């Protein structure tokens, strides 16, 4: 071999050896920077604010209404005995007092026993949109306006860009279309944005009476005979028009993904009518949102799903209703974890479920009293920055409590980095430099 | 006398040559609507604007604000606006009241059908390239009995251009 030929071949081989490992079958340009801890992540957000004293600290009415009654009303999540008196957090059987019947626990072993609980974390914001935003983006949300998409990339965009996931592999299930919730599936960051956004449903609308009227009578077109020509014509027209990236009104699924989601919508209405949707035994409100999230998990088996609950925010004016909503949310979360483990074989044993409130609630009550003369609580003071969080599943240490009232460990902004850590692109998210500089993966906090 | 005759003759000559028959040309101009190329649409229609226009287009009657508000909420409840629009459009297409051209008109008068569809949805005439592409596409699908104007209308209603004005 001539010297010149040898040099060319060696250089080509060396270059190929350097580049090829980074062009992966998934289409990603870069290999994941850390080994994934699990294949799937589900994040449950207690939107609306969960008061630390009433939840993780298990003080029930003792630290809120002046009654010396303590106890744990989140017994699917936490260890601890339920309150012995003044039971108002349960269901209301006909003819009995409001909330007098607690909901039976679903999990034989609490999430605390199965996983790790961070007992005293810190929220970034005591307000709604800021709270959700900080959880979803992992950033401090400074300068973030209301009614606009997050300024910094969401965990969905990181997942799609750095994880190489399809749109149908990332989902955000919202409880409402109010409070800018539908804007949280993607940021407006120029390097990320809607092209990396997650699919979003607010099931109460999409599959409620509005959705039923607008969507349930949709034709199911034949994929080859009818849909294919439609997409060919549409794609031709779209290529002629050339929409600008910043003008995209929503996220984009591929034609195949669209067909899949259309089938999902049609099937969901059918399964709803037949009572086949996987709803928690006690459903309605947040319970229904969890049920539809379970249906999305069953069908799409996404890599990342975030579900937002909010009934607990009724605490502003109805403390009894807040206790009931908290108890139901715990029930719904127990159902969801149990459903993943027992009904979705592709996700069982390969999923981590994390949970956290967007913020806490105030130390002092407001003047609004409910039917039990119990006072409501708003959010916005320093006490509303006190929250807890946790995770359970593959590679999560079991029966571990981290931090306490005098030793706070973890921030809500850790959640985004924790998800990135679980799915294997933590270093890329850090390198992007758009998250709270103090945030860490909760695994690293342990 | 001779001078008088000459002057009279000259006056007569000027008079005759000055009187000219008015030229009433009729060029037979046909009244035609102009649409411009209208390709520079850069403002996104709101959900309510989009469906108000689309429903009027398809049903030939205006929609109630309740219907439009409902559609708006459903649109907001889904992350992929294009996808949910397609589902809503196919819901419209399932209505008995939707007004569509016949398949015969599409296949027999393809050029007219294409032109009218572009004007109806995009408020512009098709370019030559668009006309040719659609003409070829419709002709190529003549043997597919499922290929009907409804599918063409669905593609136009779901297109990016229709979302803008």
Image (cartoon, coloured by chain):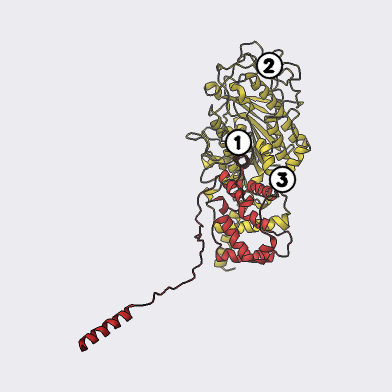
Residue A316, image quadrant: top right
Q: Earlier in the sequence, mark 3 or mark 2?
A: 2
Given this view, does label 1 or label 2 mark the residue nearer the observer?
1
Read off the chain for label 2: A
Question: Element under label 3?
Answer: loop
In the figure, is residue A183 to the left or right of A292? left
Residue A58, image quadrant: top right
Q: Position of residue A121 (x, y in %)?
A: 58, 26
Q: In the figure, B20 relative to A378: above or below?
A: below
Separation of disc 3 and disc 1 at Cα? Answer: 22 Å
Q: Which quarter of the rendered picture does the C terminus of chain A lie within?
A: top right
Q: Earlier in the sequence, mark 3 or mark 1?
A: 1
Read off the chain for label 3: A
What residue sits right under mark 1 in the picture? A177
Colour applied to chain B? red
Separation of disc 1 and disc 2 at Cα? Answer: 34 Å
Q: In the figure, B28 relative to A238: above or below?
A: below
Q: Which quarter of the rendered picture does the N terminus of chain A lie within?
A: bottom right
Whether residue A13 appears in this view of the structure is: no
**Marks 3 and 2: same chain?**
yes
Q: Which mark is residue A132?
A: none
Q: Residues within 10 Å of mark 1 (few under 14, many from 20)?
A: many
What residue sits right under mark 3 in the picture? A217
In the figure, is residue A410 to the left or right of B148? left
**Marks 3 and 1: same chain?**
yes
Give the yellow chain's letter.
A
Q: Earlier in the sequence, mark 1 or mark 2?
A: 2
Q: Position of residue A62 (x, y in %)?
A: 63, 13
Residue projecting furthest to the bottom: B2
Q: Nearer the viewer, residue A223 or A411?
A: A223
Residue at 39% across, 74% down:
B22
What residue sits right under mark 2 in the picture? A71
């Amino acid at each position: 071999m001539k010297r010149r030929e040898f040099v060319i071949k060696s250089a080509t081989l060396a270059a190929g050896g350097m580049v090829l490992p980074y062009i992966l079958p998934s289409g990603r340009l870069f290999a994941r920077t850390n080994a994934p801890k699990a294949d799937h992540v589900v994040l449950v957000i207690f939107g609306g604010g969960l008061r630390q004293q009433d939840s993780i600290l298990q003080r029930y009415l003792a630290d809120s209404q002046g009654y010396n009654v303590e106890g744990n009303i989140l017994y699917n999540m936490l260890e601890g005995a339920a309150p012995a008196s003044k039971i108002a957090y349960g269901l209301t059987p006909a003819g009995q007092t409001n909330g007098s019947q607690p909901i039976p626990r679903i999990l034989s072993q609490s999430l605390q026993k199965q996983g790790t609980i961070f007992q005293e974390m810190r929220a970034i914001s005591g307000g709604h949109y800021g709270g959700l935003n900080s959880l979803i983006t992992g950033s401090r949300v400074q300068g973030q306006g209301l009614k606009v998409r997050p300024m910094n990339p969401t965990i969905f965009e990181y997942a799609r860009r750095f994880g190489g996931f399809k749109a149908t592999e990332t989902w955000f299930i919202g409880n409402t279309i109010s409070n800018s919730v539908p804007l949280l599936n993607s940021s407006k960051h120029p390097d990320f944005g809607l092209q990396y956004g997650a699919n979003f449903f607010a099931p109460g609308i999409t599959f409620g009476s509005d959705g039923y009227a607008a969507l349930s009578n949709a034709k199911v077109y034949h994929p080859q005979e009818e849909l294919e020509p439609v997409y060919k014509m549409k794609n031709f027209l779209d290529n002629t028009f050339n929409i600008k990236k910043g003008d995209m009104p929503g996220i984009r699924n591929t034609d195949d993904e669209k067909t899949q989601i259309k089938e999902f919508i049609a099937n969901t209405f059918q399964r709803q009518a037949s009572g086949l949707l996987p709803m928690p035994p006690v459903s309605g409100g947040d319970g229904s949102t969890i049920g539809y999230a379970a249906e999305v998990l069953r069908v799409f088996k996404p890599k990342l799903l975030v579900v937002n609950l909010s009934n607990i925010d009724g605490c502003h004016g109805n403390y009894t209703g807040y206790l009931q909503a908290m108890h139901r949310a715990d029930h719904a979360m127990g159902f969801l974890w149990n459903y993943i483990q027992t009904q979705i074989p592709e996700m069982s044993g390969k999923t981590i479920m994390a949970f956290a409130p967007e913020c806490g609630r105030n130390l002092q009550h407001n003047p609004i009293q409910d039917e039990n003369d119990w006072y409501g609580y708003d959010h916005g003071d320093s006490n509303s920055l006190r929250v807890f969080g946790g995770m359970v599943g593959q590679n999560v240490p079991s029966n571990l409590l981290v931090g306490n009232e005098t030793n706070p460990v973890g921030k809500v902004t850790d959640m985004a980095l924790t998800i990135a850590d679980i799915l294997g692109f933590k270093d890329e998210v850090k390198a992007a430099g758009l998250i709270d500089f103090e945030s860490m993966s909760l695994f690293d906090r342990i | 006398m001779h001078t008088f005759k000459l002057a009279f003759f000259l006056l007569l000559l000027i008079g005759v040559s000055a009187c000219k028959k008015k030229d009433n040309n009729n060029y037979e101009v046909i009244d035609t609507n102009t649409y411009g190329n209208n390709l520079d649409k850069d403002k996104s229609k709101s959900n309510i604007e989009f469906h108000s226009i689309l429903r009027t287009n398809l049903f030939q009657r205006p929609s109630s604000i309740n219907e439009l508000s409902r559609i708006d909420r459903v649109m907001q409840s889904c992350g992929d606006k294009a996808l949910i629009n397609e589902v809503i459009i196919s819901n419209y297409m399932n209505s008995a009241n939707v007004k569509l051209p016949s398949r015969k008109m599409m296949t027999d008068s393809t050029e007219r059908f294409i032109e009218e569809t572009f004007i109806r949805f995009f408020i512009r005439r098709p370019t030559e390239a668009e006309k040719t592409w659609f003409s070829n596409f419709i002709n190529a699908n003549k043997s597919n009995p499922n290929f009907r104007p409804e599918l063409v209308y669905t593609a136009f209603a779901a297109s990016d251009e229709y979302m803008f004005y």
